[in-house]
Image (cartoon, helix red, strand yellow):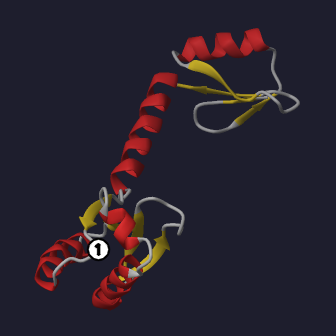
Amino acid sequence: MVINNEGQNLGVMNTNDAIHMAQEIGLDLVEINGSATPVIAKIMDYGKYKYEQKKHASEAKKKQKVIETKDIWVKPFIEENDLNIKLKKVFEWLAAGNKVKISAMTRGNRRVLFRGKDSIPQLFDHIVEVIGDRGTLESKSKPEDRTKSILIAPAKK
Protein backbone atom coordinates (compact mmCIF):
# COMPACT_ATOMS: atom_id res chain seq x y z
CA MET A 1 0.00 0.00 0.00
CA VAL A 2 1.68 3.24 -1.15
CA ILE A 3 0.80 6.80 -0.14
CA ASN A 4 2.24 9.65 -2.20
CA ASN A 5 3.82 12.87 -0.88
CA GLU A 6 0.46 14.75 -0.95
CA GLY A 7 -1.18 12.07 1.22
CA GLN A 8 -3.23 10.39 -1.54
CA ASN A 9 -3.54 6.61 -1.47
CA LEU A 10 -2.03 5.10 -4.63
CA GLY A 11 -3.13 1.55 -3.71
CA VAL A 12 -1.22 -1.71 -3.53
CA MET A 13 1.96 -1.70 -5.67
CA ASN A 14 5.01 -3.76 -6.32
CA THR A 15 7.94 -2.61 -4.14
CA ASN A 16 10.23 -1.97 -7.13
CA ASP A 17 7.57 0.14 -8.88
CA ALA A 18 7.06 2.22 -5.74
CA ILE A 19 10.83 2.77 -5.38
CA HIS A 20 11.14 3.87 -9.03
CA MET A 21 8.16 6.23 -8.60
CA ALA A 22 9.79 7.81 -5.54
CA GLN A 23 13.15 8.19 -7.33
CA GLU A 24 11.48 9.91 -10.30
CA ILE A 25 10.05 12.55 -7.96
CA GLY A 26 13.39 12.81 -6.10
CA LEU A 27 12.03 11.54 -2.76
CA ASP A 28 12.38 8.42 -0.60
CA LEU A 29 10.07 5.45 -0.05
CA VAL A 30 9.64 5.05 3.73
CA GLU A 31 7.95 2.10 5.42
CA ILE A 32 5.31 3.45 7.81
CA ASN A 33 3.76 0.27 9.16
CA GLY A 34 5.58 -3.00 8.44
CA SER A 35 3.28 -5.19 10.50
CA ALA A 36 0.12 -4.32 8.54
CA THR A 37 -1.07 -6.45 5.65
CA PRO A 38 -0.31 -5.10 3.08
CA VAL A 39 2.73 -3.14 4.31
CA ILE A 40 2.12 0.63 4.30
CA ALA A 41 4.79 2.84 2.73
CA LYS A 42 4.89 6.56 2.02
CA ILE A 43 6.79 8.63 -0.52
CA MET A 44 8.47 11.50 1.36
CA ASP A 45 11.71 13.38 1.94
CA TYR A 46 13.16 11.31 4.78
CA GLY A 47 15.82 13.88 5.75
CA LYS A 48 13.17 16.59 6.10
CA TYR A 49 10.97 14.18 8.11
CA LYS A 50 13.80 13.42 10.56
CA TYR A 51 14.56 17.15 10.89
CA GLU A 52 10.90 17.90 11.73
CA GLN A 53 10.83 15.09 14.32
CA LYS A 54 13.99 16.47 15.96
CA LYS A 55 12.54 19.98 15.96
CA HIS A 56 9.29 18.80 17.61
CA ALA A 57 11.29 16.89 20.25
CA SER A 58 13.39 19.95 21.11
CA GLU A 59 10.24 22.13 21.37
CA ALA A 60 8.69 19.63 23.78
CA LYS A 61 11.90 19.58 25.82
CA LYS A 62 11.91 23.39 26.09
CA LYS A 63 8.41 23.37 27.56
CA GLN A 64 9.32 20.88 30.30
CA LYS A 65 9.99 22.16 33.80
CA VAL A 66 12.71 20.31 35.67
CA ILE A 67 12.10 20.12 39.40
CA GLU A 68 15.29 20.00 41.42
CA THR A 69 15.68 18.69 44.95
CA LYS A 70 17.68 21.03 47.17
CA ASP A 71 19.29 19.77 50.37
CA ILE A 72 19.70 21.52 53.69
CA TRP A 73 21.21 20.13 56.90
CA VAL A 74 20.21 21.03 60.45
CA LYS A 75 21.40 19.87 63.88
CA PRO A 76 18.88 18.45 66.35
CA PHE A 77 19.25 21.25 68.91
CA ILE A 78 19.58 24.20 66.51
CA GLU A 79 18.90 27.65 67.88
CA GLU A 80 15.76 29.43 66.67
CA ASN A 81 17.62 32.24 64.89
CA ASP A 82 19.88 29.78 63.03
CA LEU A 83 16.82 27.79 62.02
CA ASN A 84 15.10 30.95 60.72
CA ILE A 85 18.11 31.73 58.52
CA LYS A 86 18.00 28.22 57.03
CA LEU A 87 14.22 28.42 56.58
CA LYS A 88 14.58 31.65 54.56
CA LYS A 89 16.59 29.67 52.02
CA VAL A 90 13.96 26.89 52.11
CA PHE A 91 11.22 29.45 51.37
CA GLU A 92 13.21 30.79 48.39
CA TRP A 93 13.61 27.29 46.96
CA LEU A 94 9.95 26.43 47.46
CA ALA A 95 8.92 29.70 45.79
CA ALA A 96 11.12 28.78 42.82
CA GLY A 97 9.24 25.47 42.50
CA ASN A 98 11.96 23.16 43.83
CA LYS A 99 11.57 20.37 46.37
CA VAL A 100 13.57 20.64 49.59
CA LYS A 101 15.08 17.78 51.56
CA ILE A 102 15.80 18.72 55.18
CA SER A 103 18.14 16.32 56.94
CA ALA A 104 19.15 16.19 60.61
CA MET A 105 22.79 15.58 61.37
CA THR A 106 24.14 13.78 64.44
CA ARG A 107 27.80 12.90 64.85
CA GLY A 108 29.87 10.61 67.01
CA ASN A 109 28.90 10.36 70.67
CA ARG A 110 25.98 12.78 70.17
CA ARG A 111 24.19 9.97 68.35
CA VAL A 112 24.15 8.03 71.65
CA LEU A 113 22.73 11.06 73.50
CA PHE A 114 19.85 11.50 71.04
CA ARG A 115 18.80 7.86 70.91
CA GLY A 116 16.35 8.09 73.79
CA LYS A 117 15.05 11.58 72.98
CA ASP A 118 12.54 12.71 70.40
CA SER A 119 14.48 15.84 69.46
CA ILE A 120 14.64 15.21 65.70
CA PRO A 121 10.92 14.41 65.18
CA GLN A 122 10.02 17.49 67.28
CA LEU A 123 12.35 19.61 65.17
CA PHE A 124 10.78 18.31 61.95
CA ASP A 125 7.27 18.93 63.31
CA HIS A 126 8.28 22.50 64.16
CA ILE A 127 9.77 23.04 60.67
CA VAL A 128 6.61 21.72 58.95
CA GLU A 129 4.51 23.98 61.19
CA VAL A 130 6.63 27.04 60.29
CA ILE A 131 6.51 26.25 56.57
CA GLY A 132 2.71 26.01 56.79
CA ASP A 133 0.91 26.51 53.50
CA ARG A 134 4.06 27.37 51.51
CA GLY A 135 4.87 23.70 51.13
CA THR A 136 3.54 20.24 51.80
CA LEU A 137 5.26 17.35 53.54
CA GLU A 138 5.84 14.71 50.89
CA SER A 139 7.77 12.03 52.76
CA LYS A 140 9.66 11.21 55.95
CA SER A 141 12.63 8.93 56.45
CA LYS A 142 12.07 5.60 58.12
CA PRO A 143 12.65 5.41 61.88
CA GLU A 144 15.47 2.90 61.43
CA ASP A 145 17.36 5.11 58.94
CA ARG A 146 20.65 6.49 60.23
CA THR A 147 20.08 9.96 58.78
CA LYS A 148 16.64 11.39 59.49
CA SER A 149 15.14 13.57 56.76
CA ILE A 150 11.91 15.00 55.40
CA LEU A 151 11.03 15.98 51.84
CA ILE A 152 8.92 19.08 51.31
CA ALA A 153 7.29 19.88 47.97
CA PRO A 154 6.11 23.36 46.95
CA ALA A 155 2.44 24.07 47.60
CA LYS A 156 0.21 23.71 44.54
CA LYS A 157 -1.28 26.94 43.28
Residue in front for this viewpoint, 48 or 57 = 57
Question: Image height check: is 66 above or below 50?
Answer: below
Is residue 105 in view?
Answer: no
Lateral position of residue 68 relative to residue 92, left or right: right
Identify residue for label 1. Answer: 76
Query: Residue drawn at (54%, 64%), measured in percent from left and top?
Result: 144
Residue 97 in the image, given as x and y percentages of width and height: 30, 70
Quadrant where the image shows the C terminus = bottom left
Question: Image height check: is 38 above or below 64?
Answer: above
Residue 77 in the image, given as x and y percentages of width and height: 24, 77
Query: Residue drawn at (22%, 77%), measured in percent from left and top?
Result: 91
Quadrant where the image shows the N terminus = top right
Residue 81, by quadrant, is bottom left
Disc 1 crowd, CA 10 A, few/some/many (<14, 14-19, 20+): some
Question: Image height check: is 128 above or below 100?
Answer: below
Residue in front for this viewpoint, 49 or 152 = 152
Query: Residue drawn at (35%, 70%), measured in percent from left and top?
Result: 113
Residue 101, by quadrant, is bottom left
Residue 69 in the image, given as x and y percentages of width and height: 34, 59
Q: How many marks?
A: 1
Lateral position of residue 150 relative to residue 15, left or right: left
Residue in front for this viewpoint, 25 or 102 = 102
Question: Image height check: is 128 above or below 2?
Answer: below
Residue 120, by quadrant, is bottom left
Query: Residue drawn at (38%, 48%), measured in percent from left and top?
Result: 61
Residue in front for this viewpoint, 37 or 53 = 53
Amino acid on which disc 1 is placed: Pro
Is residue 96 in view?
Answer: yes
Q: Residue furthest right?
A: 37
- Secondary structure under tag 1 reads loop
